[in-house]
Amino acid sequence: MTESRGKPIIVLSDLTILYDERTVDEECIREQLPAFAELVKQAGPLHTYRMTQLALWNAASLGTTSDEVVAALTQSARYNIAENVIRSIKQTMGRYGRLTLERSAGDEEQLLLRGDEAIMAEVAAEPSLKSLTDKHVDSSTLSLHHGRRGSMKQELLRLGYPVIDAAGYRSGETLSVSLADTTRSGIAFKLRYYQERAVDRFFEDSHAGGGSGVIVLPCGAGKTMVGIGVLARLQCATLILTSNLTSVNQWKNELLDKTTIDSESIGEYSSKRKQIRPITIATYNMMATNGEEQEYRHLQLFRERDWGLIIYDEVHMLPAPVFRMTADLQATRRLGLTATLVREDGRERDVFSLIGPKRYELPWKQLEHTGDIAAIHCEEVRVPLFDEPAYWDGNVRARARLAAENPNKTAIVQQLLSRHPGRSALVIGAYIRQLKQIAEELGAPLLTGEVDQEERALLYDSFRRGEYPVLVVSKVANFAVDLPDASVAVQVSGSFGSRQEEAQRIGRLLRPKRDHSGAIFYSLVTEGTMEVDYALKRQRFMLEQGYRYSLTSAVMKEETDYEA
Amino acid sequence: MRLNELLKRLPSEELNRLNQAPIWGSNHKWQDAVLCPDLLRSAAHQLSPLADRLLRYWLRTIGPLPIQEEQLRARAIQKAGLAGAELRAAIRELRMNGLLFAVRKSWGEQLLFMPADCYLAWLRAFNSSDSLEELNDGIPSGTDAGADGCSVSFGDVDRAAVPTPLGRRLVRAYAALQLLGLETTAKGLFPKKTAAGVEAIVALRSTEAFSDLRSMYQEHYPLGFTIALDAASWLGLIVHQDDGEPRWNWSDDNLGRWLTGDPNVREAELLRLFAIRYGFRNSIQAALVSGLLLLKPDKSYPISERIHPLLARWIDGMCACGWASMSAASNGGWTFRWLIDPWAVANDDESRESILVLPDGEVIVPPGASLADRWMLEQIAEWVQDDTVSIYRLTAQSIMAAAERGVTDEQLITSLQRASGGEPLPDELQYAIGHWVSRTGRTAIEQVLLLRCDSKEIADAAAGRDSLAGLLVERLGDQTFVIRPKDEAVVRRELERAGWPASKREETLQTTAPLSASANRKRKPEERRFNVIGAAAPVSFIYDEHALHLYELLTATQQLPDEARTEEAPSDWPAAWTAQLRHYHPSTRKQMIEQALAWGAPLQLRTGGRIVELVPERLDDDVDSWAVAGYLRTGEVYEPVRLLPDMWEEMRLIIPL
């Protein structure tokens, strides 16, 4: 194997690219890679990219040729690139632009799949596509019912054939809305450069499967703004689905603050209110709720209005019934927003196939580097187990609780917070009993699911103003909470090994700080217990984003004298 | 037979004599020189014309395969251009200089041979062709391609991903074999589970190159497993011992040497071992396989669609081993390319490539990483994939499994850091390793013998006796002791002396006393390790038609029967016959020719004003005339002739020196 020592990339036969940041990148391949490869992770000095079909088609749509891609890779490859890799790149990129889906001029219910004779012959030979097409119009055209549009695109994508969807989308009910030049408080406003870019990428209609897709941005990077940017560009009735009522309110506030829309045009569809307006914001729970007489009766909301756009906020939380409904909505533009497209059930591919492919993603570290999110220091603090005999006596569930609710953690929390006087801090946990005790010890307010929306809003405001420097919160604070000035977080317990929860909690700290300082995330882990295993799993997502955890041990000196 | 196998069998005096042979000079040992193309070229210049002629003929037609002396003699005149006596002289010279060797079968038949790797070295010394097309075209027409011809589809080979080089797969396979164990069943066979486990790792694509091989255990073992075992045996990694208890053992020394060598060199050695053991089936195939080995690495060799089946099969075999590629050429035909250097040499200046351990537990192993580092990772990490680089992952399961085998966290971390070129491991990972290791060995199950006393007093007394105290490993409660199984006899004897003879052992264990915490020792795997010195010939798992290692090796001074004939002219020959060219009466001419034929001597003739050499083959004797048929030898020209007595003027017999 010919080896070029010191060259930065290694190209694997499955189209994975490993970029080694320890080497000298003379050809600046790192800057070129995002044009035709997706960043998968960056653990330590090695960044993993994947030349997915979509990434290569993206590159083709922007005029990049396969020869250019191969040349760029060859110049920077440490080892020979296998012939089958080069062939794959050429074949994949060579298919771009050769298939289009159009409306039939004479029949509104029919779509036409067109391409050159060679590729149509390949397509026509695929057994899985035969049941989706109606007939061969000629050697370069197949017809199909418009209801099979989504299935056809999905299947073509699965088989590796990108199709330019020129059949268009429903424009939906027109809505006059635009981005405001200043916010309600008079501050000048415009989208940040990456938010603008994300909106642009969503609208690259010449792209395979264009007009729908998922945007992945770190927590605190302003995904809501991207959704609002898309909405403002489309100027149409929009249905927004999000994870909880707090998020519903957050969307409403941002829409009123950053756009020209009036409050009467925004509706809340929840257990409390059933307002269906040009912009309607609903929760997933509501959509997935069964009625007494009808299963998932609220799913009819999808058809209540002529929506031109459906936004799925925190799309990684999409429940199964909503998945199914989405499969039938291919003529409506769909935008998914998330920071962590990681589902513990592994259904990320379903999100891509039903909402749309990933259209834009920005690595966490890149935004940190540009100052668009706060720099963060992660630290795992190991706390000795309080009652070892009781731990070994219990079953698995009991041990998990004993480790999580380790009383020794309380004093450590105090100690850690005392390192950061004057800085706003969150203490986050999974067990109410533990959180209550900690809140009492700290003299801090406790925010749980039992606190109603109004009181919650008051607490948030007080926290923002600095009236309460510490806020103890349960899992309700994981998602869609806007706390711009939290700069310290102490996680005392979590949901077993959930990587998503870890990332979301850290996300509470990522909004840029006014004083440009960094943020600190502490994770308390009881030593020698299964909590250590959970922590190793939880941290994996952050490690793959390029973050590291420093490790410290809390030493229990005397009964009341603790030190971390 | 390869040189290293020959070296193990040569008597030290013979080795010394070879080392002092003048053609090797004083600066080089024979066993080094005979594998060095440059030194072989130099040595060839010092050979006599006869020896040189035989050597070139040998390289051209006999190659690495053994040949009976009689067969060689039968061909010598026609094919090699050597008269009988010349052949004898040439053989002797080549044997004396360590270029040819001889073995004797048990029934007396003797074979001459050139060590296979020496043959390859000679080809490298003299080869000038660098064309695959020429190699293909050089295959004699009508060469048997086998009953079924060849069904290799290079299209499929081209489209598939290139397999990992076989050496790297074998590292994994042997690591798995070590964990599975070398124990055999009562029938002396490896268990099916062992065979299946190794086979899955070797994953050798079915190819005609290897399907022709005759496995000794065809009905029991799959081919990949067989080849893995055969290679392990011939690399000296596993050794069979039969000192009453037949068993296989690992050779720690050989395994250590194999793992710590330059990985490129090891891969090349394996390729050449395959070529010699599985490719040198007959002289044509040996020439083909050798010709392939002489093609340069990192160079593309075009070849047309019409590839001879024999060549196609072997190329396919090399592709299946991940050593070569065959891709479709844009203008039709194919392009062959070595993916490794078949003659890689160790480069001491270049440090081995280090592995990269990532904070999330993934380990990236570059192609230049040492086999030892791969071996280490096989013991402690989960293999994920093999590609341009190999990827492993350190997981809780893999670390705990290693800890179960007695590896400490400190050893794990030290090994990983050393393999990383001294880079410290990420803190998160060091901690994780420590945590996972600490989870193992907290309990252990051991089989022990118990000494029960029927009263505390007896137990106290037993513990107080000097002769017994040291044999009582641990006291459990008031009346019970743990003793070692190997001490049972001694304990019984001492108990009898003390007046408390032990009753027969109870099979069921009923104790009220708990095992103490000290019983929680980490159990180390039972290991059988031997350093094998002076091992016998390796055991083969693939049938070897030639199997020279089974026969008695003859030293050069042990003359072959034909050689025993004196090289001096027969005493009844007139001196004039050999001294100078002279004119003789036809009857004398006939007599001289008869003597030449009988003794195998060539003749020198003056004819038409020029002097030529005649290698006589036969005398055609009619009633009133006779003629000599043979070959006229003039420099490199060698042409058949039939001469009547009056076709030359003068003649003499030639005695080869």
Image (cartoon, coloured by chain):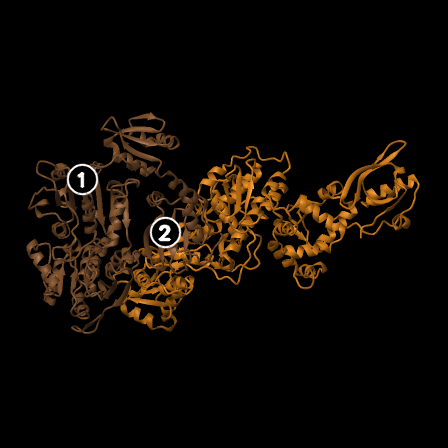
Chain colours: A brown, B orange
Q: Is residue B430 above or below residue B205?
A: below
Position in image of residue A14 (x %, y %): 39, 46
The answer for how far apart the CA atoms under marks 1 and 2 are is 34 Å
Q: Would residue B509 be visible to someone looking at this image?
A: no
Residue at (75, 48) in percent of width and height: B561
Chain to which mark 2 belongs? A
How many numbered marks are there? Answer: 2
Q: Residue B483 appears in which quarter of the rendering?
A: bottom left
Position in image of residue B28 (x %, y %): 66, 62
Name which residue type carries label 2. Leu
**Disc 1 element:** loop
Position in image of residue A313 (x %, y %): 19, 48
Residue at (41, 49) in percent of width and height: A12
Pointer 2: what residue? Answer: A33
Q: Tell me if B236 is positioned left or right of A120 in this view.
A: right
Mark nearer the viewer, 1 or 2: 1
Chain to which mark 1 belongs? A
Pointer 1: what residue? Answer: A308
The residue nearer to you, when weighing B481 against B262, is B262
The residue nearer to you, when weighing B22 against B441, is B22
* Residue B583 disc label: none
